[in-house]
Amino acid sequence: MNRSVIENALPVMASTSVAHYTRIGTLRYFIPEGKSGWASAWATPVQFLNDRMELSLGLDVLRSVADGTSRAGRNAQNIIDQLQATIGSLETDAFQMSFSGNPDELGQWRGYAANGMGCSITTDIVAIKTVADVAGWVIYDVEKQKTFARKILAPLRQETDDDLFARTLIAAASFMKHKGFQTEMEFRLIKFPDLGDVKFRESGDRLVPYIDYLRGTNPLPVRRIIIGPGWQLARVGSAELSRHHVVQGIDRLLKARGLHNVSIESSTIPYDPK
Amino acid sequence: MPATLQEVQKIIQDEFPGSDVAGIREEDHRIKGNIIWNGFKGQDARERNRQVTEKVRDKLGLKGLNVGFLFPLAPGERR
């Protein structure tokens, strides 16, 4: 897939770093023994996520701008209708990872970081783009989504490979979300892996495919870790803060992995989950 | 067992009488291709695909997990 078709049509923002929200315990998998950086990150196909309706929104936008009277437009409509009817296949599964341009945002603390008891881990955009097939900022505005969708469909006129056509549509659809998620300022990675790289984990008595985005790549730099507002560290004095067990645990992990220049900070948001 | 090419072609011809299924093929363990049928004339893509889902995929059920993209075309239309 030609990533530039999608990436050139996505919004440009000034940020050079992005954050991923997670549980604190996950840090030990992100930064495993023997690695001095972010060396492991599991990703699941969009189709297996709880918010898989997200994909439908993007596909609906693409379908709405496809010209049914042209051959390419009709192809797009057919593929989208059948993707919606079948939820795709392993060949078209888009494995995704989400980051945010805002490393300290209440909705994401609550939704993705153990209701504020987790952390956000910040890395460089330049580095994460190298591990994805497509990467960029999500579009929330309906009119901008339609403009984006038209830019995606135009070059697909030449595409004769159905799977490649479908992958491009799925990848593009992944960058459109409902405006209700706008505060997330999401930066998303999409990857269509070789089938041999797909692994499976158990989740809720189901099998869920996943890949490790960072397997076989250089570890990502870790710039900053923000501890979630649920820990109420904003109320703690600076001397006590540095001795706090949640800070100490993260600090020891970083030191044990040789990461001596990572900033550990606490959320500034006054949020008490209890 | 997943559906065979012949089973898929037969169900298509049963459900879309007179359809041309020569363009349906098996590739990388998936069955896919064009269904050319006169009855699709004048129907939009949504209606055509609704029929493909209802008359082919739903009928095949779990046997149809290996069925990929099926393009419903009227005679004379090209992909």
Image (cartoon, coloured by chain):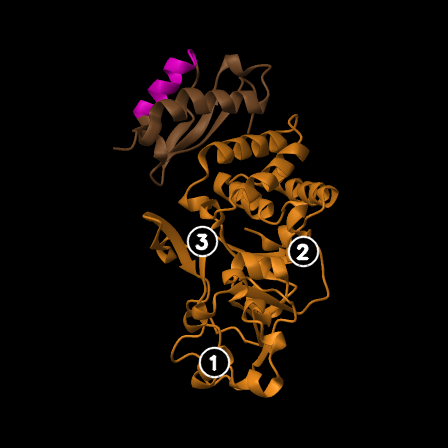
Q: State the mark number for residue A183.
A: 2
Residues behind callouts 3 and 1 on a single chain: yes
The verdict on residue B28 being magenta is no
Residue at 58% x, 75% y: name it.
A233
In the rendered image, what is the letter of the chain coloured brown? B
Q: Where in the figure is residue A8, as x and y percent of width and height?
A: 68, 54
Residue designated by label 1: A245
Per the image, the residue denoted by label 3 is A44
| Colour of chain A in the image | orange
> Along the line of sight, which residue is nearer the eye, A14 or A152?
A14
Query: In the image, is A102 to the left or to the right of A53?
Result: right
Quick check: do tags 2 and 1 share a chain? yes
Residue B9 sits inside the magenta stretch: yes
Name the one closer to the observer, A265 or A65: A265
Local crowd size for mark 2, using a 10 Å CA cut-off: few (<14), some (14–19), many (≥20):
some
| Residue A269 visible (yes or no) | yes
In which image quadrant can residue A156 be found? top right
Question: Where in the figure is residue A181, as x and y percent of width and height?
Answer: 64, 50
Give the SS element for disc 3: strand
Give the chain of mark 1.
Answer: A
In the displayed structure image, the side of residue A50 where residue A232 appears, left or right:
right
Which amino acid lies under the numbered mark 3 shown in the image of this protein?
A: Thr
Q: Which chain is mark 2 on?
A: A
Residue kind at label 2, given as amino acid type: Thr
Q: Identity of the amino acid at label 1?
A: His
| Magenta: main secondary structure | helix
- Seen at 72% across and 46% down, the residue is A141
Residues beneath discs 3 and 2 located on the same chain: yes
Marks 2, 1: nearer the viewer: 1
